[in-house]
Amino acid sequence: MSASVLFYVQHLLGIGHLARASLVAEALRRADFDVTLVSGGCPVPGFPPPGLRTVALPALASAEGFSGLVDEAGRAADEAFLARRRDLLIEAWRRLAPDVLLIEAWPFGRRQMRFELEPLVAEARAASSPTRLIAASVRDILQENRKPERIAETVDILQNRFDLVIAHGDPRFAPLEATFPEASAIADLVCYSGIVSAPPGELEGEQADIVVSAGGGAAGSALMLAALEAVRLDQGASGKWLFITGPNMPVEIVERLTRGQRPGIAVEHHRSDFRALLAHCRVSVSQAGYNTAADVLEARCRSVMVPFDAGGETEQTRRAAALEARGLTRLLRPADLTPKRLLEEVRAARAAPPPPEAQRPQLGGGPQSARILADKLGK
């Protein structure tokens, strides 16, 4: 009989956490695990993928400025709402009685969700629990500049309540200790899976020479507008530019992009064949989120990355800098972003040799995550 996994994921602003968790969940299912993905964020078309068993909790998102939690209608989530979510989550765990409880991000992040995750883990850790393994699923590069007391709290939770940490990266590229100072204290728990990625697949729609994307789109307005002006400066020299806005791009930015359409420009909300599109383009222009970087690496395409760094965010800048150091992208910092500079970087990327294969970090993080869990369970 296959081992069962309850996989919890909460996305609050973008869709990166949900996209990565969906790939891992699919890989677990292909490896004969009985997987249920519990998602607590607002619905996103295409995620989780069809055919995957899911439990949708009442949706929560971040309030403006990360000042709290709101429901799908934007109303502040009160105590009654949070208690209902907590109870539904624990009810799902009791009903499914999983062998493995896999939690995305927490306790490294998602502290806002402690109201439901702490009681969930307490039940799963109880002597009478059917759960044999409690594991954390975490990306390779964490947000820096966290308070020492929060780091100590994370270590304490992991040492006393978790059996495993699956770090979705390559330690030669981005070791956990580079952004989590107390990684040595949990070294016996950590296994690296490689970067969670998926093959490009088949191209279904029209291809483009320059593909401009911004993940979910919530924080990509400046990049999109700079790229739109860069097209005007380019005057068709680089070929067709395709803008993919993502589900969370502000409406006014989408309207400006659409009004700016002319020969040589196309605007689409979503491409289900996005990875294949990258594999056929000349240059990808994007931010530097985990999933976009994984797609660029799988596609083996030339790229320019403009990392998101507002509000003290460091993760994307660190990733883009590490990729640039290996010759795998060109880094354009947001402070230097102008249409002219962006166009210069696109032309330089297009003229450069293909990204060096030997410098790519280890990929295949989904299947390797399944092998790690199977090994820990003695499966």
Image (tube, rainbow, N blue to C red):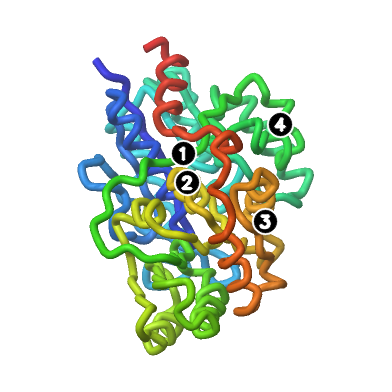
Q: Quadrant of residue 24?
A: top left
Residue extending farthest to the bottom is: 259
Q: Secondary structure at mark 3?
A: helix
Circles 3 and 4, Cβ within 8 Å, touching? The answer is: no
Mark 2: give few (<14), some (14-19) or many (20+) Cα within 10 Å. Answer: some
Q: What amino acid is labelled 3 in the image? A: Thr
Q: Between marks 4 and 2, how big is the CA–CA gap?
A: 31 Å
Would you say residue 80 is visible in this rendering?
Answer: no
Mark earlier in primary sequence (3, 2): 2
Q: Between marks 3 and 2, how big is the CA–CA gap?
A: 20 Å
The residue singled out by tag 2 in the image is: 300
Q: Which residue is pictured at 48% across the width and 59% down the height?
A: 12
Q: Secondary structure at mark 4?
A: helix
Q: Is residue 51 above or below residue 293?
A: above
Mark earlier in primary sequence (3, 4): 4
Q: Between marks 3 and 4, how big is the CA–CA gap?
A: 21 Å
Q: What amino acid is labelled 1 in the image? A: Val
Q: Which residue is pictured at 27% across the width and 48% down the height?
A: 202
Q: Relative to 146, is 260 on the left or the right?
A: left
For the C terminus, the quadrant is top left
Q: Secondary structure at mark 1?
A: loop
Residue extending farthest to the left is: 51
Mark earlier in primary sequence (4, 2): 4
Choose between 302 and 320: the one closer to the eye: 302
The residue singled out by tag 3 in the image is: 317
Q: What amino acid is labelled 4 in the image? A: Ala
